[in-house]
Amino acid sequence: MICSKMKEVYPVESVYNLLAQEEVTSVKPPRYKSTFRETVRYDAKKNKTACKTMGPVKVEVPSPKEFLLKHSKEPKLPERQIIKPEDKQPKQSFIPHRTDLPIMGIYTKKNFIRTNAAEAIMGVPKKPQLIFVDSKRGDKHPLETSGLVPKYINKKDYGENPKYLTKKNEEVKRAQEEYDAYVKARLREGAMKQLSQEERDDVLLGLKKNWDEVHHEYQGLSVVIDTLPKKMRKERLEMEMKQLERDIHLIERHKIIYIANN
């Protein structure tokens, strides 16, 4: 440890150390000057001496008579109007005096007592509001807005298919008919061949058998995939299994399969 420190302080002797070496001086780059320096300096000095005296030159001096008075900015109530006694109108008394006589000669054709009695007799009694109780304390709620009453079955169009569904079903049926007509035309021309049920089952069974073989080979791979050939073999087996699964699903989904002759 001591020897290494000595070497750092006193370097190894060499003949090249006796040669005179040129002193390296670092040259600083020129100082950065913005191109907008003069513009900023002009904008800063432009409005600095405009109002250097006691404000602008042309200014209206306020008049000494127009000073702010006390309570001048508070809201003021309108002036009170004094009404003379002779200008006052007499108040109308709604309650008749005990000495006033009733107004005679007024007669109405309608007998309110008999009318009210007839309406009460012939009127339909009001039905009580339907409620339901949902707690042991007797909390009541209206039954009509609760969703427990089958209100929709009373509609005119209840149980009928909506118009958009009927239209969609017609379009699907028309497309199926066009496709069936195209298939029949191609079958007449001999361009396509329909796969029989036995051939379809054989193809499906063969695909499943191939999948079992690939899966058995996949299960036999080593646990640790540490080389490039092992990795490539594993990826190839996975791609084959996925393709076989897609083919099996496609054949199982479609019962009728057509094969082109060419």
Image (spheres, grey):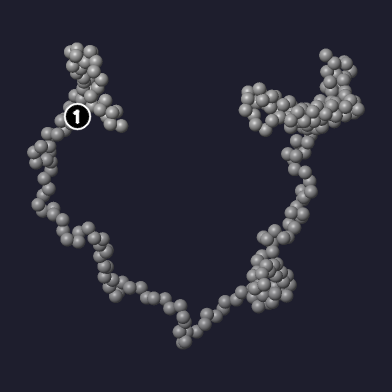
Evaluate whether residue 63 shows in this view: yes
Does 202 sit left or right of 3 as displayed?
Answer: right
- Residue 180, above or below 95: above
Query: Residue 168's spot in the image, x, y percent?
Result: 75, 35
What residue is drawn where x is 66% and y is 22%? 229
Q: Residue furthest front?
A: 3
- Residue 152, above or below 175: below
Query: Residue 65's spot in the image, x, y percent?
Result: 10, 53
Total labels drawn: 1
Q: Nearer the viewer, residue 12 or 66?
A: 12
Can you say which quadrant of the picture contains the N terminus? top left
What residue is drawn where x is 21% and y is 19%? 26
What residue is drawn where x is 19% and y is 29%? 43
What residue is drawn where x is 65% and y is 31%? 224
Query: Residue 5's spot in the image, x, y percent?
Result: 27, 29
Which quadrant of the structure image shows residue 219?
top right
The type of residue carrying mark 1 is Asp
Which quadrant of the structure image shows residue 221?
top right
Q: Which residue is mark 1?
A: 43
Query: Residue 86's spot in the image, x, y percent?
Result: 30, 74
Give the crowd class for mark 1: few <14, some 14-19, many >=20 residues within 10 Å. few
Q: Nearer the viewer, residue 252 or 232?
A: 232
Q: Nearer the viewer, residue 143 or 176?
A: 176
Which quadrant of the structure image shows residue 218?
top right
Does 52 sit left or right of 82 as displayed?
Answer: left
Q: Nearer the viewer, residue 46 or 112?
A: 46
Evaluate whether residue 248 shows in this view: no
Does 104 sit left or right of 81 as displayed?
Answer: right
- Residue 11, above or below 77: above
Secondary element type, mark 1 = helix
